[in-house]
Structures are given as structure tokens and as C-alpha cells.
Amino acid sequence: MEIIKKHIAYNHSRRYGRVRYIVIHDTGNTRKGAGALNHFLYFNGGNRRSSAHYFVDDKMIIETVPINRAAWHVGDGRGKYGIRNDNSIGIEICVNQDSDYRVAFEKTVDLTKYLMKKLGIPKERVVRHYDASRKICPRSVSADGWALWEEFKKLL
């Protein structure tokens, strides 16, 4: 699995502690061309007030924030559910209409398994953005009572 490192200049901070969670999101951006590279370009273009460690589409995985830094991806939950920016890794699945979503989904599973092994994260601590803030995210796996999320978890 190739991970392309293209680190953004904005919207990340020092991590105060160890990584305890991996949080799965999706970009919510279905426009043509809204894959991993264009999300890197967008987030590197100025202060967007949010970020993620990884963007995954059907062609590539881009690391935009080093894992030893805190990306700004679950601040909306304000730590209420124990999942915070400084104790989690954020992964965004790209949902652009000109991408093969199933391939992006499977690449995200592979990346998650790699990070679980590297960081010692158990399956129970691979969570949705929803689990950190109650925001319906990743929306792309929320249909039918989160059935696709259940499939994601079984593949880990």
C-alpha cells in the first residue's frame, strides 16, 4: 500500500498524548474531481478550520497531516464522547462521483488495518465521526441503519 505524504501547512497542532482512536469520515463532496489530491490542494490553500490525517480515493491515499500531530477533524464533539483531535487519527473517504467508491472504501479498510497494527489500536476504537459528535458522518455508510459501516468493521 502506497501512502503519498503531502503535508498541509494549516490546521493541525501538537498532539498531547497517544493515539487511542481511528475516526472514519467521508468528504461529503460528490463533485467531479473532488478526490484525494484536490482535497489536499484545498486544505493546503489556507485556513479551512479543519483537517484530516488522510484522504483516500480510488487511486491514492494521501497523508496530509503527520500522525504525530493532531488534525482538526472531531472538534465539533468537544471531547464529550472521549474522542478528541489530540487522541485520534482522522481518515476521509472521498465520495466524488467520478471515483469508484467501492475501491476507495476498500483502500480505507486497508489503511485502517495498517494503522491499527502500527499504533496498537483495537477494532473497538475504530469509530465513525458520528461516535465523536453525533454528526451523521460518514454519511456514505449511514444508510439502512449503518449497514455499510457494519461491513467496514467486519473487514477489519
Image (tube, rainbow, N blue to C red):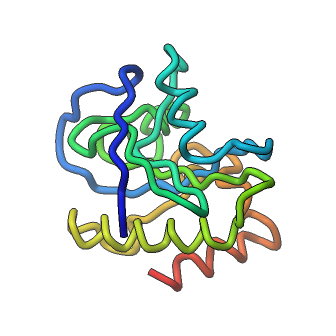
Confirm whether residue 78 shows in the render. Answer: yes
Q: Quadrant of residue 65?
A: top left
Q: How many marks?
A: 0
How far across and how far down the image is residue 23, in percent? Answer: 46, 54
Quarter in which the C terminus is drawn: bottom left
At x 70% / y 65%, what residue is drawn? 101
How far across and how far down the image is residue 114, in percent? Answer: 32, 70
Quarter in which the N terminus is drawn: bottom left
In the rendered image of this protein, does residue 141 appear above or below residue 110? above
Residue 27 appears left or right of 108: right
Which residue of the protein is positioned furthest toward the bottom in this rendering? 154
At x 40% / y 44%, what residue is drawn? 53
At x 71% / y 66%, what residue is drawn? 100
In the rendered image of this protein, does residue 12 appear above or below residue 102? above
How far across and how far down the image is residue 150, in percent? Answer: 62, 78
Front-most of residues 23 and 135: 23
Which residue of the protein is positioned furthest toward the top in this rendering? 46
Q: Quadrant of residue 72?
A: top left
In the rendered image of this protein, does residue 123 appear above or below residue 118? below
Residue 95 appears left or right of 108: right
Q: Quadrant of residue 146?
A: bottom right
Confirm whether residue 82 shows in the render. Answer: no
At x 50% / y 35%, what residue is drawn? 40
How far across and how far down the image is residue 108, in percent? Answer: 50, 66
